[in-house]
Image (tube, rainbow, N blue to C red):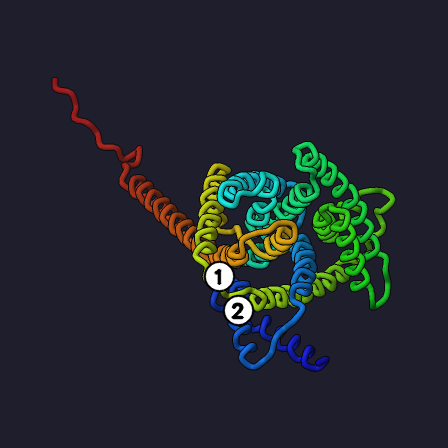
Amino acid sequence: MVYSAILFASIFLVLAFAIERLGRFLRVPSVIVMIVTGLVAKPLLGARGVELAGLEVVVPILGAIGLILIVLEGALDIELRRDRIRTAAGAITIAVAGFFFLVLFFGSIALLALGLSPFHAALLAVPFAVISSAVAIPSSDFLPPRSREFVIYESSVSDILGVLVFFALLNSTGTLASVAAGLIGGGVLSLLLSIVCAVGLMLVLVRIDGHIRFIPLLAGLFGLYALGEILHLSPLIMVLLFGLALNNPTLITRFRPLRNWVDDRYEETLVGFKGLVLELTFAVRGFFFLLLGYWTELSTLAAPEAWAAAVLVLVTIYVSRHFMLKASGHKRGAALTWFAPRGLITVLLFLSVKEALELPRYLDGTVVLVLLASSALIAVARFRLTKEDAEAARAAAEEKAKEKDRAEETDEGAAQAPEPGNAPQGKPPAA
């Protein structure tokens, strides 16, 4: 049994690596291929009498760890500069406005169609309103730097806001006052504790010497995240701030007592830490989406109600997003419209909803269908970006050609004009 488990784990990792490479070659999000591979693997393994047990415990754990690592990886790519403030502010505004609009709309549908109470309907709406950083951040590598930062900020803020609102609703007494108290109190406390923990973890990384330092640091990060979840806070703020502090040490060293904490070896240390986070993120993410596909019941995907609900969710997400980005005047709005995937955080929150509420079984299929379709639509973003770049290049070439023509016309006019000393003389006046 032990060696069989090792064999399966090894096969899963190699398969995840192959799928990742294939997805880059085919320009298809690897998440789709992983889930589909898991879906196909279940009947094939079942025919040979092989069944993977305990996935109801393993999948949520892998999802939580994967979420931490993916947000951390994205934050480690962000450089904070004054000229990027506008990008961050725009991303946060779109994330907050889009989230609350979708919660209101999906909550209203759940209230009418499923007969849930207003608070339970809002609770069910939250997983579908959250943009998944677990899919958005890894899939944004083809975007220009500014657009990639927009995606990182937007998806991270959406995740954080979704967790805060979700637990405020889950732990409320059924009144708006209790929800507001939980949201404001949890948000302020999460922010304060996150700042302290993020700064502390960074200083630990800077000061620890020896060969073994990254794993204990990550263990501390995971432990603090778990403690924050137990206290119903939003520890993703801590993960985001920790990554930002590591990649932008001047946030810490500008304070006089900490000015000399970062030495010449810091860059080398940071590169090593980024490499470890990248490798671990790949492994956990691969396991999660492969096992999620295996764990999904095919019968729920075939239900007509699942497809109808998925279409409604997807149309609402992208239509509302299109108008929000258009109103914001974002330069890459046409491409970023399609960058709203649902994924890991959606699955984790939906599993928590299922523990609290009795829901129709077809909604399991709706979640997977929305996840697959929204991930696939990122390919449209790539197409739109390529088209925009081609149009911009063509417009630049046309403008350059027009300038050249204008310059040539100016030169020809100058060549045809007579010189002042050689101007033709008029006829003398008649006597």
- Residue type indicated by callout 1: Leu
Spot occupied by residue 301 in the image (x, y as percentages of width and height): 48, 61
* Label drawn at residue 423: none
Where, by quadrant of the figure, is residue 417 drawn? top left
- Residue type indicated by callout 2: Leu
The residue indicated by pointer 1 is: 301
Question: Is label 2 or label 1 in front?
Answer: 1
Report whether residue 93 is seen: no
The residue indicated by pointer 2 is: 39
Q: Name the residue rendered at 79%, 46% in the picture.
A: 252
Residue sitting nearer the eye, 337 or 50: 50
The image shows residue 339, relative to residue 97, as above or below, that is: below
Where, by quadrant of the figure, is residue 215 drawn? bottom right
The image shows residue 95, relative to residue 53, as above or below, that is: above
Q: Name the residue rendered at 46%, 59% in the picture.
A: 303
Residue sitting nearer the eye, 223 or 117: 117
Q: Name the residue rendered at 51%, 51% in the picture.
A: 339
Image quarter where the N terminus lies is bottom right
Mark 2 and mark 1: Cα distance apart in space: 11 Å
Spot occupied by residue 358 in the image (x, y as percentages of width and height): 59, 51
Residues under numbered marks 2 and 1 in contact, where contact means CB atoms less than 8 Å apart = yes
